[in-house]
Image: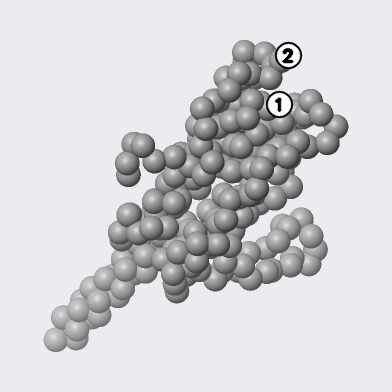
Amino acid sequence: MSTTEHAPDAEVHPPTDPGVTSEVEDLAQQIADQVESFLLALQAIARGDAGGRAIPLLLLEVSQVLLAGARLGVQTDFEPVEEFQPDAGPDPDLDELRLRLATLLDGVDDYTEVFDPYVHPPEPITTRLSDDLSSVAAALAHGLRHFRAGRTSEALWWWQFSYVSAWGAEASAALRALQSVVAHDRLDHDLEGESEQVAAAEEMLES
C-alpha cells in the first residue's frame, strides 16, 4: 500500500475543540488513527491486494477496530458541543467498496446471526459480510470527518453513540462470521486428514 494513500476525505488535522482536555484529545487521536488504519486496510483488501489472505486480514482488522469501540464503550458518555450535529459533508460513496467485498467474499458473504442474544425466543437474521463491513466503514468515516474538521467532541460522541447503537453490533457479527470461516478452513481440513488416517488404520487392522 502506498504511504501517500489516505482514507476518504483526508485533510490536515485542525486545532483541538476549545475546552477539550489533553487526555481526551489523546484518546480521540488514537481512535482516529485506528479508524483510518481500518478504512485504508479495508480498501486495500477489497481491491484484492491481500490475495488469498483476505479473510484472515479482515478478521485482524475488524478485531482491532472493535478494540477502539470497546475503549469508547467504557468511557463516560461524551457530549457534543452543539445541540444539533454539524454537517460533516457528503457521506463517501461506498457502493464500489461493498461490491468489491461481495465479489471477494463470494461463497461466504451470506451468514446467519442472532440479532439480539437476550431476546426470547432468539431472532436469527441473514445478512452479508460485505454489507456489514461497508456499514461499519460508513459510520467510522463519518466520525473521522468531524475529527478532521476540528470537532473532537462531536467525533467522539458520534463514534461512541454509533458503536453502541449500530456499528459495534455489525462489526461483532462480522467478526464471528469471519472467525467461523477461518475455523472451518483449518479444522475441517484437519478432520478430513484424521478421517483418512483412521480409515487407513482400520484397513491395516483388518489385514
The residue to which callout 1 is attached is: 153
Q: Earlier in the sequence, mark 1 or mark 2?
A: 2
Residue 113 lies in what quarter of the image?
A: bottom right
Relative side of 188 to 7, left or right: left
The residue sitting at 39% across, 54% down in the picture is 45
The N terminus, quarter of image = top left
Q: Position of residue 76 (x, y in %)?
A: 75, 26
Using the image as rendered, state which of residue 101 and residue 71 is in the foreground.
101
- Decide: few, some or many residues near mark 1? Use Cα within 10 Å; few <14, some 14-19, many ≥20: many
Identity, as a three-letter code, of the amino acid under mark 2: Gly
User: Is 174 displayed left or right of 100 in the figure?
Assistant: right
Q: Nearer the viewer, residue 39 or 129?
A: 39
Q: Position of residue 2 (x, y in %)?
A: 32, 41
Is residue 3 positioned above or below 40 on the image? above
The picture quadrant where one finds residue 104 is bottom left
Q: Is residue 129 visible?
A: no
Label 2: which secondary element: loop
Residue at image location 81% in from the left, 29% down from the top: 82
Question: In the rendered structure, which amino acid carries the disc numbered 1?
Answer: Ser
What residue did someone put label 2 on? 19
Q: How many marks?
A: 2
Residue 18 visible (yes or no): yes
Q: Are marks 1 and 2 in contact (CB under 8 Å)?
A: yes
- In this picture, residue 49 sits left or right of residue 20: left
Q: Which labelled disc corresponds to residue 114? A: none
Query: Could you tell me which residue is drawn at 36 percent across and 37 percent down?
Result: 4
Q: Quadrant of residue 80?
A: top right
Residue 87 image point, x, y percent: 73, 39
Distance in Å between CA atoms under marks 1 and 2? 9 Å
